[in-house]
Image (spheres, coloured by chain):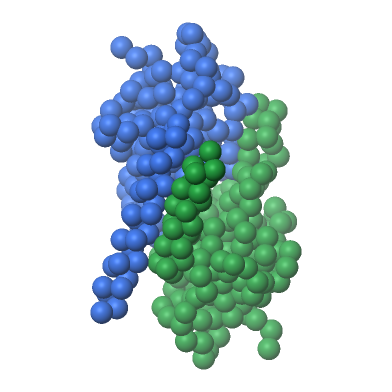
Amino acid sequence: MSAWIRVIGGLAAAALGSLGLTACDLGALGGTPLRGEPATEKVRDWSFLEPRYAVEIETHASSFLPSAQARFVVQDGVLWLYAMGTADFEVPWVRRLRDQDPGFTIEVDGKLHQGRAVWVSDADALAPLLPAVLRKYHMVETSRARFVPSPERFPGTQIRHGFFRVDPAPR
Amino acid sequence: MRLRVVGMRVAAFFAALVLVVFVAWLVGGVEPYGPIAGGRLRGAPAESLPEDWSFVDRVAEVQVETHFGPLPWSVTTWCLEHQGRLYLPARNCRSKRWVKNLLADPEVRVRIRGRVFELRAAEEKDPEIWRALIEQMLIKYLGIEAEQPQPVTGVTPESQGRAYGCAFRMEPRR
């Protein structure tokens, strides 16, 4: 039994070590610190990001894997980070931005921009974002959408949505 | 030189990964966990197929086992029910391994609340059913009500090839 544990432990350590060597990137779950040059100008309109599927961010709150691929939408030039979770699971970067430190870095084409993530949970404020979210991440086209409470027919099956409005980092 | 180092690291990573997966498979099969695929599904075989699958309205996730060559390949996914029939929808359909597996071999095993059903998948193409499934998916999983929702057709630029939803109707095996 102890031999098995040693073998499996060794293999797991080898896998983890290899993962570290490959500049670890586990998508939304986390990755190693971002590399790039500090951006010299603040971005006032993020619309140019719209054709992309996800952006690389790094939270200022400390973490073993501080970066992550984050989903997003742009509405009227404002960047919104978007995450999906369940009752049991929330992606780590969401927890860090909401509960520890809203400061983060976003990497765009090798430039590192500083931002401040503002957690928004007001359903009415988020409703205008939903058509873009549905089109981009759920393959559904609609002109208008809104959040509705969980109906009796589907108890406890809804995912959790997380939205952050990205403001420029304070000086 | 740099390319060679990166190549060696990638090779080391995949070699270690293959070893871990292989050992896990030998030791008794790995179950799917969250977004990570697994192998053979364990569970009590269902003695018969239900006439009405509406009980899955209360089920958030099911596991589906497909075949990736000779290996079992299982994932956790969503489930929908329409007019008593069971459907498994997939986002980013074109890029999902389990969908490709299922299109190559439609015989699947679906585990719902610990019971394993042996079924055959057929892609649903009826637009009316599609619309009903989309409305249900939005409410059941996203908690969103949308005005006249339609499936996105084709591949949108921002999806980078991921787009294209699909749904599979589960039928008894022939």
Picture layout, residue A24 above or below residue B126: below
Q: Position of residue A42 (x, y in %)?
A: 55, 85
Position of residue A47 in the picture relative to residue B162 (left or right) = right
Q: Which residue occupies the foreground of this view, B32 or A129?
A: B32
Which chain can be seen in green?
A
Q: Which residue occupies the foreground of this view, A167 or A143?
A: A167
In the displayed orientation, state which residue is furthest to the bottom. A40
Position of residue B69 in the picture relative to residue A78 (left or right) = left
Picture layout, residue A159 above or below residue A94: above
State whether residue B65 appears in this view: yes
Locate the C terminus of chain A and report the quarter of the image it occupies.
bottom right
Which chain can be seen in blue?
B
Q: Which residue occupies the foreground of this view, A142 or B19?
A: B19
Which quadrant of the view contains residue A97? Answer: bottom right
Number of numbered discs on residues: 0
Q: Position of residue B33 (x, y in %)?
A: 52, 41
State whether residue A161 appears in this view: no
Name the residue located 71 percent from the left edge and 57 percent from the top edge. Answer: A121
Name the residue located 46 percent from the left edge and 63 percent from the top edge. Answer: A17
